[in-house]
Amino acid sequence: SLPMGAAASLFASAALVGAGLPDAGALPAAAFHFAGLLLGLSFAGVGPGAGRRRGAAVVALGAAAVNLAIFPGIVAALLCMGVAIATLAYGFLTGQRALLAAGVGAAGFAVLQHMRVALDFYALAHWGSLAGIGVAVIVCASLLERHHEALRQHLAAARARLEE
């Protein structure tokens, strides 16, 4: 049952913390374990499993975002980004707009946190880093200008799939 699965997830997380897992890993460990249990139950349980898979995605995404808010850093940002991309892909493939929006929001949150850490790491007062940012902007703009029609067609096709 779900309460027993949640208790097992908390017990496993406590055991991992006792074995030396840092505090920043306790929440993702418990939540990902519980999300894995929900995911397994969605395939082995009785009835349609879409709700349980949606719940597993929400639990994993919520834990990764809360972990990033509590313990900001590069590892937490990459973990949140990975879970957000997986949730975004699942939401897109199944046509669930709420999960798609949640994945986009969490990916944006992870990028903003990563940019905050990156700005603290790099010294923008130096000419070298400013020149590097300028070159990156020019390259991105030229790629967008060169491939804008293909990007527009892909976005239109994706929008049409979501509206179906």
Image: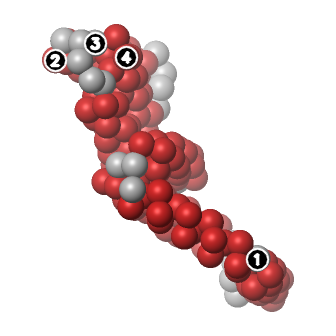
Query: Given the image, on which type of amino acid does mark 3 rest?
Result: Gly
Residue 65 vertical placement versus 8 (above, below):
below
Residue at the spot x=52%, y=61% of the render? 158
Residue at the spot x=37%, y=38% of the render? 57
Query: Given the image, on which type of amino acid does mark 4 rest?
Result: Phe
Query: Given the image, on which type of amino acid does mark 2 rest?
Result: Pro
Marks 2, 1: nearer the viewer: 1
Q: Neighbour class for label 3 at 10 Å: few (<14), some, many (≥20)?
A: few
What x and y, as percent, mark residue 128?
83, 83
Kindly identify which residue carries mark 1. 147
Residue 163 vertical placement versus 84 (above, below):
below
In primary-sequence order, the first of circles 4 and 1 is 4
Marks 2, 4: nearer the viewer: 4
Q: Secondary structure at mark 1?
A: loop
Alpha carbon separation for disc pair 1 and 3:
46 Å
Kindly identify which residue carries mark 4. 43
Alpha carbon separation for disc pair 4 and 1:
41 Å
Residue at the spot x=47%, y=26% of the render? 21
Residue 154 vertical placement versus 66 (above, below):
below
